[in-house]
Structures are given as C-alpha cells and as structure tokens.
Image (cartoon, helix red, strand yellow):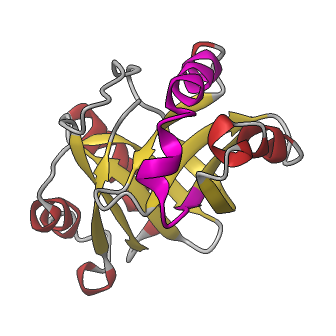
Amino acid sequence: MIVYHIAITAADDYLTRREAHRRDHIGRLQGLRANGILIGGGPSADLKTADLFYRLQQPGQIKFAIEEDPYWTGGVWIRYEPRSFSQFVEPWEMVPVVLDGTRRATIIEGPTAQHDMAQFALIEMRGAGRLAFGGFFEDGNTLAVVNTADGDEAIRWFAETDFWKPDALTARPWLHVL
C-alpha cells in the first residue's frame, strides 16, 4: 500500500457550491474510510484548501479517489496535488466524523535534522496523544497532523525533540473532519 497526501484547492465560491454535494461527499468518504482507503481528511480553517490522506495500492487510483468525488464533479474542488509518503505513522484509531468544525488540529510541515530519530519521535508523539498521523516524503520533509489547535505549541513539540529544524517548520490550522 502507498499512503498519499492529497492537497486540494477549493473553488472561490466553495461554501455556496458545497451544499448541494456535501451529503454525497461525506457519505463517499465514510465508505472509503470503512474500506480502509481513506485515513483522514478535512479542510483548512479558512476553507480554501483541504488535505486528504489515502491508502492506495497503485498511483492510478488517485484519479478515482479524487475525480469521482462529488466535490470534484460538482466543481467544489478545482485542483489537487498528490504526494506519496515514503514512511507513514498510522493513526491508532479512526476518529468519529465531526462536521461542525470543532475538532481543530494543526498540520506541521518541514525538514528533519535527524531523520532516523525523527521516525521514532513521531511514534512517541502518537503514543503521547500528540500526533494523529503523519510521516515523511522522499525528500525528507515531514507532514504530520497533530492534536492541538495551537500552531506554536505544535512546533514546540517537534522542536523539543531536536530531530527537526525548528526554524524551517510551518504550522497551519486544519479541521480534522474524519
């Protein structure tokens, strides 16, 4: 299996467009999650982008995962960029669906200072309840979903390990829907 991060760009009129397709979109994602394909997803806090995490058998399945979604066919999403993880720390549990924006999280991105040790640190952060899931890309950069709405706190968690380059880390707010 290959785990992909799919960065989605929403249409400028996202809120208007989504309503007609939202029920079908969420239902489809729940079905993909029940079948072990979707790991998690949700929009950015400003609703201009979304991040989805899929477990696929081959790269050709990306098109199905995105372009058959009601948000894509309905013009709610207008662009996507997939990246495959070279290493990924799976979530311990699938969280319940939260549609009202109250489960706020942070996405951390950036390079490691000590890649081998950073792998262990992600696992430890998951055990401490700080990390929902995340991993590393081939270029050594990290993308991780952390269980705090406070971006500074999230960066501090990574910086405290000394396995990331803290000045190069970025934090962005994310609504962890499913």
Q: Residue furthest right?
A: 60
Magenta residue span? 7-33
Q: Quadrant of residue 34?
A: top right
Q: Point out residue 113 in the picture as x, y percentages from the top left corner.
A: 38, 77
Q: Is residue 23 magenta?
A: yes
Which residue sits at x=66%, y=52%?
Answer: 75
| Residue 76 relative to residue 49: left or right | right
| Residue 156 relative to residue 4: left or right | left
Which residue sits at x=58%, y=26%?
Answer: 29
In front here: 86 or 113?
86
Q: Quadrant of residue 125?
A: top left
Q: Is residue 44 above or below residue 97?
A: below
**Quadrant in the picture for the C terminus:** top left
Which residue sits at x=18%, y=59%?
Answer: 154
| Residue 116 relative to residue 3: left or right | left
Q: Quadrant of residue 61?
A: top right
